[in-house]
Image: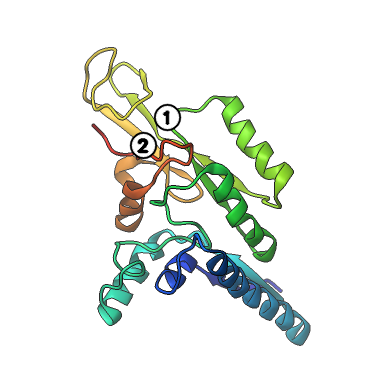
Amino acid sequence: MGNWIYWFSRSSNCFNRRTSWRKSKSKRIRIENCYFIRQYTDKLIEETRLNWSCYATPAEGLSGKFIKHDKRIYGIIKGVTDKDYYTNSFHIPVSYSISIKDKIEIEAPYHKLCNAGHISYIEVDDSPSPEVIMDIINYAYKNTNISYIGVNFHIRYCKDCGESLTSNESKCPKCNSRDIQGISRVTGYLSLDERFGPGKYEERIDRRSHTGSYKNNYEII
């Protein structure tokens, strides 16, 4: 029989024009919008006897393709089409300064509503210890209904001597080589830095850590 889905992306961009995501009213409106989609798909199941569901899509190529299309029609709208990519699914924009705890708690309600697929990401500095990653997972698991979470950090190493780099430096601290390879998450998978598509490349430039430093771990110095 297969599956039929209603998917959505750019929830943040959609409502940025009207209200800030930091306000309680904004959070409520965004969740209500997702809840409406979920209710509609549940209704379609009853009416059609088909497998309908709500999907928070992790748009990759579409994140750049859709915004180009909308810019041609609507022009540049601050907070909506003023970048070269749309923010995925229900995610808080990657450039916002927000703590790990707040990001988890704001995005958690969507996981239950998006029964076809959902994921939340946390950005951390450098190469975190297993304990740091476990603390993040445990907090999400014990305090929210988040069921799928990824912890992102920039992996960089020297291609000449294999030394791992723990900073944004452009030169190997061991052999002084500048032949450095970076690896980072696109959406649900890792990729060499130079293989990112245009939209996701611009999105990665804007990413900020959620650890409290709020620094950009992808800017090479």
Q: Is residue 105 above or below residue 117?
A: above
Tell which circle, 2 or 1, labels the residue nearer the N-terminal end.
1
Q: Is residue 11 left or right of residue 154?
A: right
Q: In this view, does 214 lie above or below 78?
A: above
Q: How many marks?
A: 2
Query: Which quadrant of the structure image shows residue 112?
Result: bottom right
- Seen from this angle, which residue lies furthest bottom? 47
Please tell me whether mark 2 sits on a helix, a strand or a loop. loop
Q: Name the residue under label 2.
A: 217
Q: Name the residue under label 1.
A: 126
Which quarter of the rendering shows the N terminus? bottom right
* Residue located at (30% from left, 53% from top): 202
Q: Distance between the residues labelled 2 and 1?
A: 7 Å
Q: Is residue 128 above or below residue 41?
A: above
Q: Is residue 74 left or right of residue 115?
A: left
x%, y% of residue 118? 60, 58
Q: Of residues 197 and 13, which is closer to you in this image?
A: 13
Q: Amino acid type of disc 1?
A: Asp
* Residue located at (47% from left, 60% from top): 88
Residue 14 in view, yes or no = yes
CB contact under 8 Å: marks 2 and 1: yes
x%, y% of residue 94? 42, 52
Please tell me whether mark 1 sits on a helix, a strand or a loop. loop
* Residue located at (50% from left, 28% from top): 128
Which quarter of the rendering shows the C terminus? top left
Query: Which quadrant of the structure image shows residue 131?
Result: top right
Q: Amino acid type of disc 2?
A: Asn
